[in-house]
Image (cartoon, rainbow, N blue to C red):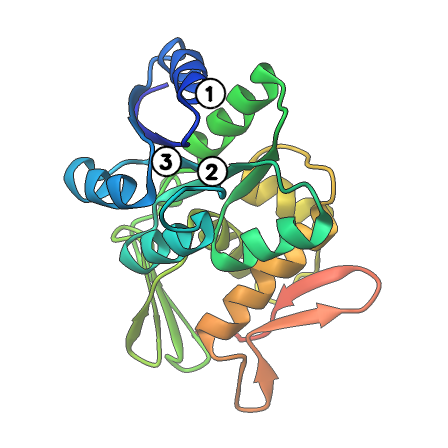
Amino acid sequence: MKGTVIVVDDETKLRDLVRAFLEREGLTVFTAATGSEALSLAEKVQPDLVVLDLGLPDVTGEDIARELRSRSDVRILMLTAKAGDEDRVKGLEIGADDYVTKPFNSRELVLRVQALMRRSRTWEGSTGVRSFGEGVITIDDGRHEVRCRGEVVHLSPTEWGILETLTRMPGRVYSRYELVNAARGYEWEGYERVIDSHVKNLRRKLGGDTGGRKVVETVVGYGYRFGLEKD
């Protein structure tokens, strides 16, 4: 793997352990012990991925995730002792791309990181601009840019992956299982709630509905489809 990662955790031993795992995979790894240090470092090195603990001493990991997401589409993997389903969903709704609980299996962590790093920021082989709903939504694959009613919409890598999948065949229904594999590149326990959280974020960012049609429609008992026609 190639890329830059910031590992944020106030436990020195854990930071060093995760750093060793990821450097062994060929990644360039920086570390931070506090939220303020992480934000400053992210501004300098422009990482591809941030591995983020939620229990930081100065600023909550959730606030750091929100700030990072407001700045860029950097991949965010939350690494935390908060193991409840509601904690996972909250983390994903904030904008995280994945969520790993402590204690963790080192191999699983590396596989999660690999999957996130494989998520290209552009759709492979695509460079054109696609328009939907009479120009309500446009997707510029080459620039990795989404606009809703002319305004740029910032999506996380996972949200981008879901939108790319749905818009390749508007009207086709995708199961949650298909979407989680398309967006993440691997199977994940609890994928139904994961996808529901990301779709909720997509709907909020893309305006929910237009002209009586929902941008992302729910097909009860199966999954989701993109509700706007291609121009």
How far apart marks 3 and 1 lie (CA) works out to 17 Å
Contact (Cβ within 8 Å) of mark 2 with mark 3: no
**Dot 2 corresponds to which residue?**
53
- Whether residues under marks 3 and 1 lie with C-beta atoms below 8 angstroms apart, the answer is no
Helix, strand or loop at disc 2? Answer: loop
In front: 94, or 179?
A: 94
Q: In what element is the residue under mark 3?
A: strand
In the rendered view, tell whether residue 224 sits above or below residue 164: below
Seen at 59% across and 84% down, the residue is 213
* Disc 3 target residue: 49
Whether 109 is drawn above or below 33: the answer is: above
x 50%, y 73%: residue: 204
Amino acid on which the number 1 mark rests in the picture: Leu
Residue 230 is at least partly visible in this image = no
Picture coordinates of residue 156 (x, y %)? 42, 53
Q: Residues within 10 Å of mark 2 (few under 14, many from 20)?
A: many
Q: Are marks 2 and 1 in contact (CB under 8 Å)?
A: yes
State which tag comes first along the sequence, 2 or 1.
1
Q: Amino acid at mark 3?
A: Leu
Q: Looking at the picture, how far across and down is residue 164, in whole percent? A: 48, 54
- Name the one closer to the observer, 144 or 70: 70
* Residue under numbered circle 1: 14
Horizontal and vertical percent position of residue 84 = 71, 46
Q: Spatial distance from mark 2 to mark 1, Cα to Cα?
A: 10 Å
- What crowding class fits label 3: few (fewer than 14 Cα within 10 Å), some (14-19), or many (20 or more)? many
Q: CA distance from mark 2 to mark 3?
A: 13 Å
Of all residues shown, which one is farthest toward the left? Answer: 44
Disc 1 element: helix
